């Protein structure tokens, strides 16, 4: 009886610890996602906007509409850059897409991220003089910072709206599709309009910025990278981590240590790079002596579910 009560107490404690950790992970993921939107804004407003360049995507569309309203129609909005507000309005239909097809968590984080993105676009004002006068240098630095920010937001389970939501949707629906690719497709339209309205040099340098941004997003967005893990362990519990927690398939067989002659379990599985950190962490929690071999960026055909 005493033992049963003790077991129940331990189970309750473990449950409380797991729930506390889950809430902590959620808070951290939101902070990372919001930080990513701040980095994107810094990359755009501090390095790109001062040079009169356009960013592409839905933010770029917002910038074009702002330019038309201010420069062509003579509307005055004071010191506020209304591109952020226009950007938010354009994202409303995509919130519905995220809610229906990409899950509640992604939907909520997308709203939070887009809201903060719009606020950052309003409050982070572009300097009167460019921080980096070299246009190519500014495009590279702005693209690196912005791409890192978008990738950070996506890794945290959110999105910066616009092409990010569409990119995640199409990457989930179609093989060999990525967030960066949908961004480029949308920007063909955006910069086509820019070419009609502005000097062609503005379009060329803006395209360079977006190309750097897209490449960095794809490199940093781990869900686009397929990875295999070969695990050597004596613990039978490792298999359940893969099948129950990650909900991935695996192939298992028995092996024998070359030096010890002891029997060991060999498990082979395919996951996204985003899932590798969680897998390795859980393996080490159960079996500190487990040996794991990771191979990245593979081409995998067949029944491999892409999770975003």
Image (spheres, helix red, strand yellow):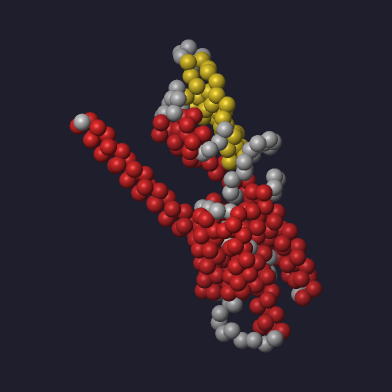
Outermost residue on the top side: it is 261
Image-quadrant location for residue 296 = top right
Figure check: 216 above or below 6:
below
The quarter in which the N terminus is drawn is top left
Q: Nearer the viewer, residue 197 or 21?
A: 21
Residue 37 x %, y %? 54, 62
Image-quadrant location for residue 295 = top right
Outermost residue on the left side: it is 2
Residue 96 x %, y %? 60, 62
Relative to 168, is 232 on the left or the right?
left
Can residue 36 be seen here? The reply is no
Q: Residue at x 56, y 79 (%)?
A: 80
Q: Residue at x 68, y 65 (%)?
A: 56
Can residue 97 be seen here? The reply is yes
Q: Residue at x 54, y 51 (%)?
A: 155
Image-quadrant location for residue 148 = bottom right
Q: Residue at x 62, y 60 (%)?
A: 97
Q: Nearer the viewer, residue 296 or 161?
A: 161
Residue 228 x %, y %? 59, 33
Residue 26 x %, y %? 44, 53
Label count reads 0
Q: Nearer the viewer, residue 143 or 149?
A: 149
């Amino acid at each position: 009886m005493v033992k049963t009560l003790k077991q129940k107490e331990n189970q309750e404690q473990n449950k409380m610890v797991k729930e506390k950790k889950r809430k902590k992970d959620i808070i951290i993921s939101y902070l990372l996602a919001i930080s990513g939107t701040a980095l994107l804004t810094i990359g755009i407003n501090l390095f790109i906007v001062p040079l009169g360049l356009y960013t592409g995507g839905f933010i770029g569309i917002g910038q074009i509409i702002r330019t038309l309203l201010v420069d062509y129609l003579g509307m005055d909005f004071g010191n506020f850059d209304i591109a952020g507000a226009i950007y938010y309005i354009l994202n409303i239909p995509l919130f519905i897409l995220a809610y229906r097809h990409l899950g509640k968590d992604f939907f909520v984080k997308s709203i939070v991220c887009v809201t903060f993105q719009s606020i950052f676009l309003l409050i982070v004002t572009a300097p009167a003089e460019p921080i980096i006068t070299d246009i190519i240098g500014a495009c590279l630095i702005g693209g690196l910072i912005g791409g890192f920010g978008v990738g950070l937001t996506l890794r945290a389970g959110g999105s910066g709206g616009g092409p990010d939501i569409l990119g995640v949707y199409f990457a989930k629906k179609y093989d060999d599709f990525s967030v960066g690719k949908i961004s480029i497709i949308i920007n063909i339209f955006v910069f086509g309009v820019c070419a009609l309205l502005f000097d062609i040099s503005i379009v060329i340098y803006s395209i360079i910025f977006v190309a750097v941004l897209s490449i960095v997003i794809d490199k940093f967005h781990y869900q686009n990278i397929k990875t295999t893990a070969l695990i050597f362990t004596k613990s039978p519990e490792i298999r359940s981590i893969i099948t129950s927690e990650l909900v991935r398939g695996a192939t298992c067989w028995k092996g024998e240590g070359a030096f010890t002659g002891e029997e060991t379990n060999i498990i082979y599985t395919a996951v996204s790079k985003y899932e590798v950190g969680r897998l390795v962490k859980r393996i080490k929690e159960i079996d500190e002596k487990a040996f794991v071999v990771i191979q990245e960026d593979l081409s995998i055909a067949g029944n491999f579910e892409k999770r975003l």
